[in-house]
Image (spheres, rainbow, N blue to C red):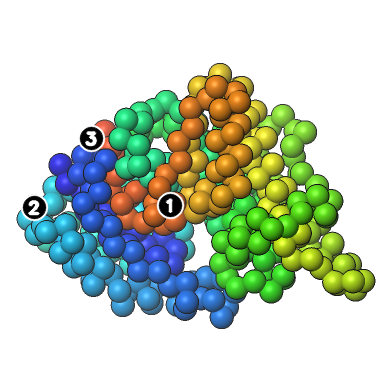
Amino acid sequence: MKVLGFETSCDETSCAVVEVGRKVISNVVFSQIIDHQKYGGVFPELASRRHVEKIVDVYKNALTQANLTLKEIDVVAVTVQPGLVGSLLVGVNFAKGLALYAKKPLVAVDHLKGHVASNYITHSGLKPPFLCLVVSGGHTQIINVVDYVQHEVMGRTMDDAAGEVLDKVGRVLGLQYPAGVAIDALAKTGNRKRYKLPRPQVKSSDLDFSFSGLKTAALNVIQCEQLKVGINIPDMAASFQGAVVDVLLEKLSIAMREKNAARFCLAGGVCANSELRTKAAAWADCCGFESFFPAFEFCGDNAAMVAAQGYYEFNAGNIACWDLNPLL
């Protein structure tokens, strides 16, 4: 079974073809990062306009790379939530029209379930149940993946997402959006003990995250240091990134104990972070857990993960109606 997937939840226009939920035949991604850099973040109206401009070309390129025609596609899948409503509308309306024209089943996919599914296309033998830490610019969640379509959210951010605070602190440090990659690179040469930053919520037994206080603490340190001798950017990058990673893994460890779980996955754009991957892998080895991380090309938003999850939604009988709209 071949699933044609569409992803337009934020600022990537993507289309992909995935076979039986595991084999990526094509995956085309058009990134708008350059368009949004001058704003220091995603400009929602501009994002939706770029999706309108690019979605036809991305779709055609995905079929061309897969060496397939629309007739050879079995199911059309599209992200319906969460995301920017204007961006989601472009993908949903295009996928809906395409499926209706081609008389193909239409499947609605939750964006976060798609991120979890990025591990299925990287690790062909991975099957639920497991826990998954989803970390991106807009989301931070610990998910109990009961089966392919039944997901239980155990904890989520109460304010800023981990990727969001990395970008915001990076912007104050003068780093170009998206700053997470730059912080990761600078942290490799920095002293993570140079600046004392809090670890919010780590002593709490609940599984929710809160990063706004950590962000404020870092901004206050930066402001004070600038008035004195100036901030050491690599040291701040290492200190701040270290605090974020510590909080993420501490909460995940609580969830693993609570569920008596034996394996976990990472997912989302921030799971490309080298410190998070290294520490998560080392912690898993120390505790005897199995750990799975998606390939770097599937960490960010992409349609391959949507098509992969679409396969399992279709098999579970979750077929969308023709009045499908983004779910907010």
Q: Secondary structure at mark 3?
A: helix
Give the residue at mark 1.
296
The residue positioned 49% from the left and 32% from the top of the image is: 291
Residue 252 at x, y percent in the picture: 61, 34
- The answer to whether 304 is drawn above or below residue 38 in the figure is above
Which of discs 2 and 1 lies nearer the camera? The answer is: 1
Residue visible at 61% across and 57% down in the picture: 184
**Image marks 3 and 2: residues in contact by CB distance under 8 Å:** no
Which residue is depicted at the point 39% across and 51% down?
A: 298
Q: Earlier in the sequence, mark 2 or mark 1?
A: 2
Could you classify mark 2 by the number of other residues whose Cα lies within 10 Å: few (under 14), some (14-19), or many (20 or more)?
few
Q: Amino acid at mark 3?
A: Asn
Query: Which percent across, then down, holds residue 294?
Result: 42, 44
Q: Residue furthest right?
A: 228
Query: Which one is earlier in the sequence, the residue at label 3 or at label 2?
Result: 2
Name above or below for residue 266 compared with residue 7.
above
- Label 1 environment density (alpha carbons within 10 Å; few <14, some 14–19, many ≥20): some
- The single residue placed furthest to the top in the displayed view is 260
Observer-nearest residue: 217 or 281? 281
Q: Amino acid at mark 1?
A: Phe
Asked if one can make out residue 259 in the rendered structure from this viewpoint, the answer is: no
In space, the residues marked 3 and 1 are separated at their CA atoms by: 27 Å
Secondary structure beneath disc 1? helix
Residue to which mark 3 is pinned: 315
Q: Which of the labelled discs sits on residue 29, or is there none?
A: none
Quarter of the image containing the N terminus? top left
Mark number, residue 72? 2
* Amino acid type, label 2: Glu
